[in-house]
Image: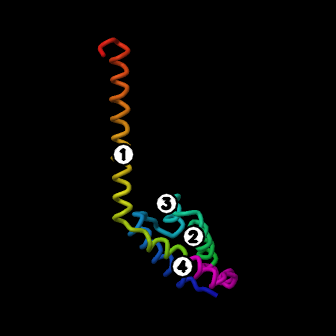
Amino acid sequence: MITDKDMAEKSRKLRGLMQEKLDVRGRDLRQSLRRAGRRLPRRVRKSGAALRRAELMAHNPKTARQVDAVQVDRDYAVLRDHLLQINVGERRKARLLGLAGAVVANLILVAVLFVIWLWWRGFV
């Protein structure tokens, strides 16, 4: 059996990791997971959903007995391990490189269209 305090502690730690690694804030685990969305792989999102359900069940003493503590620990480990593996610097660099690539591609497209327009009008 898992207690409400155990689940609150795990939830607090996961929300802190999500804020640190993904820059996702939320008042509870449900909101943090929802805001993280597709930045988390499907397997990790499933573990997060299971933790969210276990957290809801842990609030009520009768349903807290139904929560499988081993499965909760396993889901917690999956989510925690994934978040710990995220390199914030690499993520930032990849985002900036993606943005720079998009800008360069758009500039090349505009230049090509301009040359085509000049050719069509007879200036080239």
Callout 2: few (<14), some (14-19), or many (20+) C-alpha neighbours within 10 Å?
many
Residue at (36, 28) in percent of width and height: 112
Circle 1 residue: 101
Q: Is residue 68 found inside the magenta-colored segment of the image?
A: yes
Q: Main secondary structure of the magenta part?
A: helix
Is residue 2 placed above or below 102 in the rendered structure?
Answer: below
Q: Earlier in the sequence, mark 2 or mark 1?
A: 2
| Mark pair 4, 1: CA separation | 36 Å
Q: Amino acid at mark 2?
A: Gly
Q: Nearer the viewer, mark 1 or mark 3?
A: 1
Quadrant of res 121: top left
Q: Amino acid at mark 4?
A: Ala
Q: Nearer the viewer, mark 3 or mark 2?
A: 3
Q: Earlier in the sequence, mark 3 or mark 2?
A: 3
Instruction: Give the SS element for disc 4.
Output: helix
| Mark pair 2, 4: CA separation | 10 Å
- Residue contact between numbered discs 3 and 2, judged by CB atoms under 8 Å: no
In the shown orientation, is residue 105 left or right of residue 7?
Answer: left
- Residue contact between numbered discs 4 and 1, judged by CB atoms under 8 Å: no
Question: Which label number is shown at residue 39?
Answer: 3
Outermost residue, front side: 124
Outermost residue, top side: 122
Q: Position of residue 106 (x, y in %)?
A: 37, 36
Question: Which label number is shown at residue 48?
Answer: 2
Q: For the N terminus, which image quadrant?
A: bottom right
Is residue 7 placed above or below 118 in the rendered structure?
Answer: below
Q: Which residue range is magenta in the image?
A: 58-76
Q: Amino acid at mark 1?
A: Gly
Residue at (69, 83) in percent of width and height: 62
Circle 4 residue: 77
Callout 3: few (<14), some (14-19), or many (20+) C-alpha neighbours within 10 Å?
few
